[in-house]
Image (cartoon, rainbow, N blue to C red):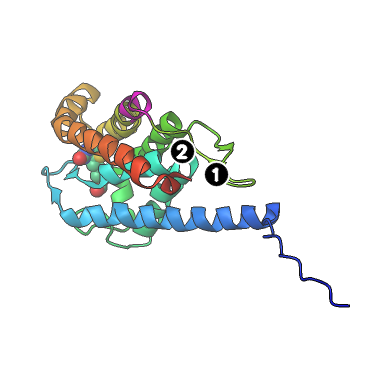
Amino acid sequence: MHSIPQPTQPTQPTQPAVAREDALRSLARIAVFAALIGALGLMGAVPVPGLVPVTAQTLGVMLAGAILGPWRGAAAVSLLLVLVAFGMPLLSGGRGGLGVFVGPSAGYLFGWVLGAAVVGLFLHGLRRSRGAAGPGRLRPPRPTWLRAVPGMLVGGILAVYAVGIPVQALITGMALSDTALTSLAFLPGDLIKAAVACLVTMALWRAYPRAFR
Ligand SMILES: O=C(O)CCCC[C@@H]1SC[C@@H]2NC(=O)N[C@@H]21
């Protein structure tokens, strides 16, 4: 007698397999956002003599936090900074090397790490929750304007300035108040970048929410 072949059940991936896949996907995304921030440097810099350049790279920093969340966003910026430290010309104007970490913009560079983390905290919170994304998959909360706008302002601008301005004052020997005043020149551009980052974040969630996982 022949037995009737039973349809095979699709096998669920095991928990360690899901975790491994998530880790690999995270690494790939961290690398992609480090590359994106580097690529935004190709747009060039508006040099401010002896001071800190106006750059589109802060847009990439905001997006890294908003899309990847606090830990991976900060990791993407850190990876970029490690590559810069090794001499890769990934900062606006094709700059790189250890020298940038003792120049007037050094504090802003470290502020980018904090900034991406703070943006990510506003949009993702500290932990992603398990849910309908699949068995064992972690998923971030849906971004809302109420999280995105203050997130970009506090993380993408305030947090970056909070580290950048005091370090710039220390390195240049300028008074803190004067340094803060000169940094107001960055504000219009940074507000535009924050608005663009909000729009891109909301549009990307609608078009491709998987990008946030
Ligand atoms: O390339 C560097 O050496 C770092 C540039 C830091 C630029 C700071 S970040 C905040 C503010 N917004 C800008 O467009 N420029 C400054």
145 or 10: nearer the viewer = 10
Check residue 156 in the rendering and tell me which mark sits there, or answer none: none
Left or right: 116 as drawn, with respect to 108? right
Q: Which residues are magenta?
A: 144-151
Residue 171 visible (yes or no): no
Does 161 sit left or right of 132 as displayed? left
Under tag 1, what secondary structure? loop
Tell me if residue 164 is in the magenta stretch.
no
Label 2 sits on a secondary structure element that is helix
- The image position of residue 81, as x and y in percent, is 37, 52
Q: Position of residue 154 (x, y in %)?
A: 33, 26
Disc nearer the start of the sequence (2/1):
2
- Name the residue that disc number 2 marks: 70
Residue that carries the numbered disc 1 in the rendered image: 133
Secondary structure mostly seen in the magenta stretch:
helix
Q: Nearer the viewer, residue 152 or 185?
A: 152
User: In the rendered structure, which amino acid carries the disc numbered 1?
Assistant: Ala
Frontmost residue, 158 versus 194: 194
**Viewer-closest of 29 and 140:** 140
Badge 2 vs badge 1, beta-carbon distance below 8 Å: no
Camera-near label (2 vs 1) is 1
Judge left or right: residue 183 versus residue 210.
Answer: left
**Residue at the extreme front:** 1
Q: Position of residue 66 (x, y in %)?
A: 38, 38
> Does residue 25 show up?
yes
Occupied quadrant, residue 48: top left
> Which residue is located at x 30 percent, y 34 percent?
164
> Who's the residue at 46% across and 34% down the image?
124
Q: If the image is split into quadrants, where does the N terminus sit?
A: bottom right
